[in-house]
Amino acid sequence: MTRAIKVSSWNEWDPLRHVIVGKADHGQIPAPEPALNAKVPEESDMRGRWGRRSKDSIARANELLDEFSALLRRRGIRVDRPDPIDHNLAIATPDFTVANQFTCMAPRDVLLTIGNEIIEATMSYRCRWFEYLSYRPLLEHYFEADRGFRHVAAPKPRLTDRSYRPDYFADRIDEPTRLEWTARKHFVTTEQEILFDAADVTRFGRDLVVQHGFTTNAKGIDWLRRHFPSHRVHAVNFPGDPYPIHIDCTFVPIRPGLILNNPLRRLPDEQRAFFARNDWLILEAAPPAHNEPPPLCYSSVWLSMNVLVLDPKTVCVEASEVRQAEQLDRLGLEVVPVELRDAYPFGGGLHCCTADVWREGTCEDYFPRG
Ligand code: ABU
């Protein structure tokens, strides 16, 4: 029997009942553009290359995403899949053009579920401007099926050149310079307009922790604060990260009271006080099993900690990430290994390739000491 649709999810760990898993169809290496130039490391094999990904790589990524979907279904979780648009098409708006797009492998980057609401994020890369269209059929279906569902699109940004700092377009910026810039919050995106990617937000019930970095600016955080007046919205930044995009390889809650923090991207002391005051333990994540991301991948090796929590006792970890799996096992969780590494180049790991529709539970205050 098919369960009724319910959109509701308040945190990253309550029992997962319904989720969207992305697809790799029409996957692209995006053409150069300001925000992406700032993210792709100088030594990356993606520098100077763009266009369609190979048929074989797309088929392999889809095989892994299909297997992951089947695993979740066997565990009783409802899984929906997007309707991919043709990401090979160029985009022209009155303000910019790009020669191709990206993928819809990573719904977590685009869709932010908070309670009974799913927000289509503004996004901050030009190549991702239309990515929400791949999810529209699902959101339209949820709107028909669940009278409580609120479908929200955040203000679409113009993404003119004024949204990006020209000093980030230099051919070569050394890592010490990048680290000095990110430590003083000099990011590639400016404060010209509201910008945020959904994957910069991590949800702790009444509290939303939002990374200020390349893909989310202070205006984006302010928009979230005004949009959710009953939540506390905390802006955080991680000075050790030369390419700060998306919080889910950096600061990952596992269950109430426990967070994994990337040891190279340590949350600054003054920002830790709030967690300590409320008896939350912030542990250094285990080191990744790999020294390099897979070929043509714009994410870092820290996709090792990009885990999907199924409930406070169960977590999906990429199958080759044995150190991360061992750490979570020692912390008392059942670890479910999931092979996904060959799909990483299409947009990320197990958390990135999913977006919550329904987790059991309600909006709780996990930080009563404010
Ligand atoms: N989408 C998450 C990427 C973060 C990282 O490259 O570390």
Image: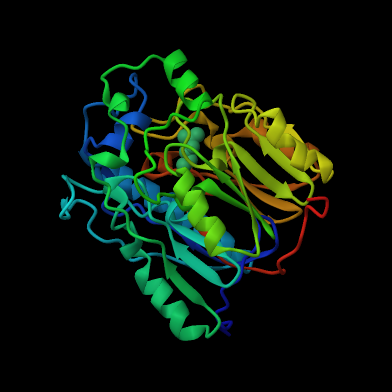
| Residue in view at x 28 percent, y 58 percent | 130
Quadrant that contains the N terminus: bottom right
- Image location (x, y in percent) of residue 159: 27, 47
Q: Residue 94 or 56: which is nearer the viewer?
A: 94
Q: Is residue 315 left or right of residue 175?
A: right
- Residue 3 against residue 218 in the figure, above or below: below
- Residue 86 against residue 56 in the figure, above or below: below
Residue 198 in sight from this viewpoint? yes
Q: How is the image coloured?
A: rainbow
- Residue 88 against residue 82 in the figure, above or below: above
Q: Residue 226 or 135: which is nearer the viewer?
A: 226
- Image location (x, y in percent) of residue 185: 49, 30
| Residue in view at x 24 percent, y 41 percent | 54
Q: Quadrant of residue 282?
A: top right
- Image location (x, y in percent) of residue 147: 52, 85
Q: Is residue 273 left or right of residue 359?
A: right
Q: Quadrant of residue 181?
A: top left
| Residue in view at x 83 percent, y 50 percent | 369
Q: Residue 135 or 149: which is nearer the viewer?
A: 149
| Residue in view at x 37 percent, y 38 percent | 189
Q: Quadrant of residue 322?
A: top right
Q: Is residue 368 left or right of residue 352?
A: right
Residue 354 in sight from this viewpoint? no
- Image location (x, y in percent) of residue 206: 69, 60
Q: Is residue 188 left or right of residue 219?
A: left
Q: Residue 288 or 134: which is nearer the viewer?
A: 134
